[in-house]
Amino acid sequence: MGRVENRVAIVTGGALGIGKACCEVLAKEGAKVAVTDILDKEGKKLAEKIKGAGGVAEYWHLDVANEKEVEKVFSEVAKTFSKIDVLVNNAGIAGVSKPTHEITAEEWDRVISVNVKGVFLCTKYAIPYMKKAGGGSIIDMSSIYGIMGAPDAPPYHASKGAVRLMAKTDALFYAKDKIRVNSVHPGFIWTPMVEGYLKSLGNVQEGRKALDNLHPIGHVGEPNDIAYGVLYLASDESKFVTGSELVIDGGYTAR
Ligand code: NAP
């Protein structure tokens, strides 16, 4: 039996990077996976790949900052797979990297709208289905940037700090409903987001080396390093774990 056999899992931002790895690992361990993203070509390709490997997956277009879309897609997922047990609130954007006094209100709002409001909306619309299913697991993707500061991306830090406490508050609200809510805090993971960020700063190879050196373990992580933590939180192996922070960061925050 798989570790999440017959669970129905929605992964937001599931087409690329960490989300993609979560979709693949959850499907490999028996979950029916709703791959959702704003990148339709990549999302559909991933759902086909999972099905080709013998798993169960479907793709839905979903912008997590759009309430109507969240409501509609969650209802379609529940109809297609008959329930919702797991929500991986993974979609997120890095936003601008500049000092606070140079950031426009629009740049600030964009990051908060995807990274914070998106988590709120997806949680809001998942809860009724999880209550109906008799329980569930919500996994909120925060970051080491939700635990400690750095002089680079103020709205991103604000958003990931918010997500960390949203997970704890929701853990307390819904413990009685057997819905567990936890946050995950990756160090730097090699994904299109990080590669794009380094491109915007100049030299990708040099940038990667500098990022490697920030992690005591000697290198940045890979998407599966996070996906296996998500799998644990999605499964019953973590049935006593709620309101907690799973830090997966190669020792970055251990200093
Ligand atoms: P990624 O490579 O950019 O993948 C994220 C996916 O989410 C992309 O397909 C992206 O599409 C999509 N997305 C963006 N806005 C969306 C929206 N409004 N609705 C739905 N999907 C949307 O990012 P990643 O590095 O895998 O990061 C995944 C999560 O982990 C994020 O929450 C991130 O903050 C967090 N995280 C990442 C790292 C890291 O080092 N990679 C570290 C700590 C935390 P576009 O490509 O079009 O934007």
Image: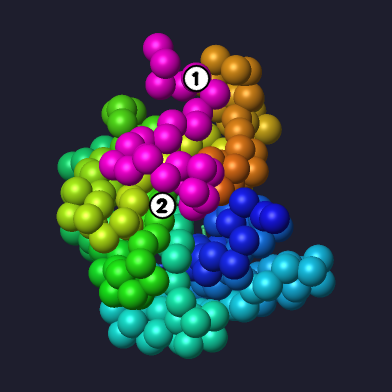
- Which amino acid type is shown beneath numbered disc 1? Gly
Up-down: is 251 above or below 137? Answer: above
Stretch in magenta: 232-255
Q: Any mark on residue 251, and which?
A: 1
| Distance from Cα at disc 2 to Cα at disc 1 | 21 Å
Q: Considering the image in quadrants, where does the N terminus appear?
A: bottom right
Residue 84 in sight from this viewpoint: yes
Question: In this image, 52 relative to 83: left or right?
Answer: right
Q: Where is residue 168 in the image (x, y as percent from the top left)?
A: 24, 44
- Residue 47 on the magenta segment: no
Q: Cβ(mark 1) to ligand 1 < 8 Å?
A: no
Q: Which of 93 and 5 is in front in this view?
A: 5
Residue 143 on image: x %, y %: 40, 39
Residue drawn 42% across the image and 35% down it: 246
Q: Which of marks 2 and 1 is in front?
A: 2
Q: Is residue 192 at all visible to an observer of this figure?
A: no
Query: Residue, x 59% and y 67% (percent of image)?
Result: 6
Answer few, some or many: residues within 10 Å of disc 1's Cα (few below 14, many 20 plus, some between 14 and 19). Answer: some
Disc 2 packing (10 Å; few <14; some 14–19; many ≥20): many
Q: As shown in the figure, which amino acid type bears the numbered disc 2?
A: Ile
Mark 2 sits on what residue? 139
Q: In this view, does 208 lie above or below 230?
A: above
